[in-house]
Image (cartoon, grey):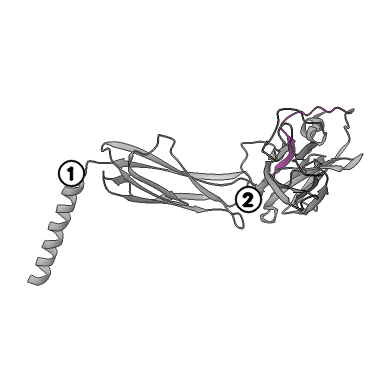
Amino acid sequence: MAHWNKLCCVLLVALTGGPGLVASQEITWYGPVHAGQIVTFTCSSSCSTKCIYTWSFLGRTVNGSTLTWTPDGRDSMVELHCNILDPGTGVSNTMSINVEIHNRLSVQISSPNTVPSLNKSLDLVCYCDTVVYVLDPPLLVYQVVWYKDGQKVTLRENMQLPDNATLHFDSLLPSDAGFYQCEAYTIMSRRRRLFSLGYLLSFEPWNVSISGPDIVFPGRQSKFTCLARCSLNVDCAVKWQFRSGFPIGTHLSVYENELRWTPSIPGTFQNFTCVAENVATRRSAEATKMVEVKDGSEAVQFSGLFVMIFSLGQLLLFDS
């Protein structure tokens, strides 16, 4: 029964719900699109004679106004194209939509609070987060295949499969690092294949820091830079967050990992948070910097003190 809880997603259901995209020339479907579940898209238009429809997606071509498709979970977003040809006029048109694929199957650590460490044991679990009911009688017999960096996992001395949905490491080695996915399918129908979201097993910390001043002054622009070092061969995207409130000032601009801000209210504090993340590997790290906005008169006093020190230095230099 424990295995059933982990792998309920391999079973398929028919989708129901509200309409999808509607335009003058329509592409319609019903309900959200889930990996491992059948969904039907319909392309419709008006032609002088009977329209000829052709679907194209993921390098595949399907003829007809309807496209019946079961996403396998490899992609989180898929672009569908419907080409409409009016044979009477020879005019054709193509409609395109981006479809988001929701995936209930994922690879997770058996204990969420566990931090993977070299020479320590670890369990990766092929897990489904929602029970899926089926119209057909349940098919409880399934098979799981594990992948690392896109290749089927070959068990080594430190690896075991204690059950169909768990990949166990007796003692983690540096060579065990990589991007893990599981594939599930019923033995009775290998066409019903479902690939999971992946998990990045890494022993390298993601270091994130924010460079820039700790003290800023009203009317003066300051620059802050998010410095992110992610795992080898894994790209991480950088985004800024303002959890303590949006920065108040006369100017704020963000371009990739660089933020420029001109504050306007002295005596306040502002927190900048930089998040480095990779959605595909479900890995992220962040850093927060607190900045104080001081009265501008202090900056003038400091500037005058600097000029005085510089002048004294010049005087001593020429006197010598």
Q: The disc labelled 1 sits on which kind of residue?
A: Ser
* Looking at the image, residue 171 lies above or below residue 14: below
List x then y, in percent, for residue 214.
Answer: 33, 46
Q: Is residue 212 visible?
A: no
Closer-to-camera residue (73/77): 77
Q: Which residue is mark 2?
A: 202
Q: Mark 1 = which residue? A: 297
Q: Is residue 220 left or right of residue 186?
A: left
Instruction: Give the residue furthest to the right.
Output: 188
Question: Could you say which disc has been placed on residue 275 in the image?
Answer: none
- The span picked out in magenta is 116-136
Residue positioned 61% across, 54% down in the render = 234
Q: Quadrant of the N terminus?
A: top right
Residue 108 visible: yes
Residue type pointed to by label 2: Ser
Is disc 1 in contact with disc 2, using a CB cutoff of under 8 Å? Answer: no
Q: Residues within 10 Å of mark 2 (few under 14, many from 20)?
A: many
Majority secondary structure in the magenta region? loop
Q: Picture coordinates of residue 282 (x, y %)?
A: 62, 43
Q: Position of residue 132 (x, y in %)?
A: 78, 29
Give the secondary structure at mark 2.
loop
